[in-house]
Image (cartoon, rainbow, N blue to C red):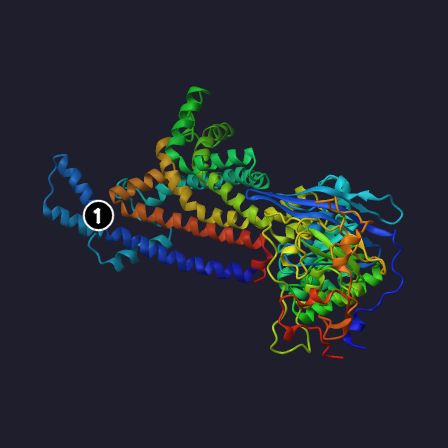
Amino acid sequence: MLNYIIRRLLYMLVTLVFVAIISFMLLDLTPGSYLDTEIARLRQAGGNMSDGQIEALKIRYGVNDPFPLKFGKWIVGVLQGDFGQSFEFSVPVSSLIWGRLAFSLILATSSIIFAWLISIPLGVYSATHRYTIPDYIITVLQFVGVAIPEFLIALVLMVVSASVFHADVGGLFSPAYVDAAWSGAKFVDFLKHVWIPIIVIGASSTAWLTRVMRANLLDVLNAQYVQTARAKGLGEGLVIWKHAVRNALHPLIMAAGGILPALISGEVIASIVLNLPTTGPLFINALIKKDTYLAVAFLLLLSVMLVVGNLLADLALAWVDPRIRLE
Amino acid sequence: MTALETDVRRRDGAANANDNLIEVKDLHVHFHTTLGVVRALNGVSFNIPRGRVLGIVGESGCGKSITGLSIMQLVARPGKIEGGEVLFKESGEQPVDILKLGRHSDAMHHIRGNSIGMIFQEPMTSLNPLFTVGKQIEEAVLLHQTQNHEEARRRAIDILDKVGMPNPQRIADSYPHQLSGGMRQRAMIAMALSCTPTLLIADEPTTALDVTTEAQILELMRDLQKEIGTSIMFITHNMGVVAQMCDEVAVMYLGKVVERATVDDIFYDPKHPYTISLLRSIPRLGGERHGRLDAIKGSVPDPYSTVTGCPFHPRCPSFMPGLCDTLVPAETRIESENLHTVRCHLHPGSTILGKFGSSGGVATTAPETMTGFAAPSNASEPMVIPGSGGGTVNNSAEPNLTSGDVDDGAAPRVNRTS
């Protein structure tokens, strides 16, 4: 088992090295740089810059350095915790991202937990009551959940909670608490706000996982060992939850690892609509403005989250299934 | 003495006719599918005497497994038990009609695993891959026998030892994927016997195993049966296995028991054309090398259709037009023999005029006009017995039963081995 974890950690490192190179290269390959955007903005505003000034800026920012040099400088910095400077905000990237990354992580994790809590019981019920009216209703809800775009759910939920419950919606905090230090009251306020984004971000994965759970459990229920468990005299509840569901969980655990990117992209839209202080909007903005170091930092850290998520999923899988553990 | 004669030992002292552990009466199971109703069991009746081994044989799709599952009330949707009785008599207790108990009732849970154990065909998939073998056996023991975990663990290891597992402690801590097919089937047997049930339903327990392992498993089951005194309902399509394992045999075709006799009578004196055909369709040692193997012509009818009259008539070599396709033969007793019943118009008593379409019940009237068709010819031609490499048997059925459309060169009527 320890071997397995060490091996997986090594794979993870290799993956991340490649991710770093590729993401940096991709951003470098796109024509232009933040300077072009900035110069265009300045010129539009009426300012004038001589070619000499531009050249001086380019040298200062190292825009025309060869790729290996640029990458080398950057990766050495990253290893020391320095992600470079944001062009747009003129502050170190690290001062911008950690807070937002934390919120993103909290939202993604809570959304997965939300999705699991809803989809497992629903999927189990749906599979054990196949072709009954509740099963059909759940199936229809699943399709709606998968098909409906996040921003629409976000808008509907905002409208409903604002007009029906007179709740303060949008953002993660009420205005009074945004800059306040963490306290009990602030946490309560946070909980009051966070449920909308959790539902919005988790809705489609909940629907999808319910579908997966149902299909898997139907397969497992046909397995011989389920019949064996019944023949032993176990009650139906134990047969389903102890013998069948545990065997049907694999894809759900795998999904939890792989679902992270989907959650992050879902989160981008939800965050823009709901005005959340998470990575999504800032990331999009950085990509549009060619704020290279900010964008590449996000790319790298989101990849780290994805790879770590996958590792955790694999460990959970090994914990559930002895066939993987004892390989 | 040939190998077969050692296998098919004549067992003396037939069990007391009243001492049946299980009596299945007129059992009907239907599957309601979108394509129509499949009548999987169509009035199955038989009994299992206490402490004996009953073989249930027949081709695929004739309802053997469903019969086993019905006794456990484990028939899955869309299957439904439509009627009949399964009387279960544990010694010293009042008979219980299992089918009257709720599928999920406590009484039913108490019977499953505790009073009736079951072994399935596929040892590779019949153990849960996520739990150790020991835990899976302990689960049954904890459920029925004791609350004490240490005691349960001890019993699990004991029973693993009893089924011939080397190093039972280690096996108990192994996961199913670490064991071979034969070992897993031993583990299954251990699990099924862990609560010393009075009945063991074995649904083709050796079909998926290679012959060496099969022989070991059969020997194990026979030894344990003797030791524990469990009755076994042994579902199989392998006549060789029947010869080795069973005391009595029920031959099933299309959801009905068509012949029921002791194992000796089934092999030495089969009455129903289907039984005879089954016996002849098995390859045998000493048979003609390049001769064609007898197959039963045709195949089991489409399950959605209903066959009128005798269910076997479309494939029967001795089909009598006007009789077999209109009148359902009743179960009739062969007078000269113990416990031998058959459903076939060739035998006096099966044909009951005026009872078209009826089933069940032992006929008492045998119209003279009909018996003319079926008088056994007493042509005691020896017939090579399948399954165990030779031996002879008196085939007292009519010659036209055995000829059919079979090429004469391959007809196994000439005894070539003894």
Q: Residue at x 60, y 50 (%)?
A: B303
Given residues B415 and B109, the one toward you in this image is B415
Q: Residue at x 46, y 34 (%)?
A: A199
Residue B70, how many percent across, how many down?
71, 47
Q: How many numbered circles does the render carry?
A: 1
Residue B154 lies in what quarter of the image?
Answer: bottom right
Given residues A278 and A227, the one toward you in this image is A227
Decide: few, some or many residues near mark 1? Use Cα within 10 Å; few <14, some 14-19, many ≥20.
some
Answer above or below: position of A278 versus B43: above
Residue B14, how many percent across, how many down?
87, 60
Q: Residue at x 53, y 44 (%)?
A: A213
User: Amino acid type of disc 1?
Assistant: Ser
Residue at image mark 1 = A33
Residue B407 lies in what quarter of the image?
Answer: bottom right
Give the letter of the chain under mark 1: A
Q: Is residue A20 visible?
A: yes
Q: Looking at this rendering, what residue extends furthest in the front direction?
A: B369
Residue A107, how many percent across, how many down?
45, 38
Answer above or below: position of B395 versus A155: below
Q: Is residue B60 left or right of residue A147?
A: right
The C terminus of chain B sits in image quarter: bottom right
Q: Is residue A45 left or right of residue B242?
A: left
Answer above or below: position of B226 versus B331: below
Q: Is residue B154 visible?
A: no
Residue B396, how many percent across, how many down?
77, 66
Given residues B173 and B343, the one toward you in this image is B343
- Disc 1 element: loop
The N terminus of chain B sits in image quarter: bottom right
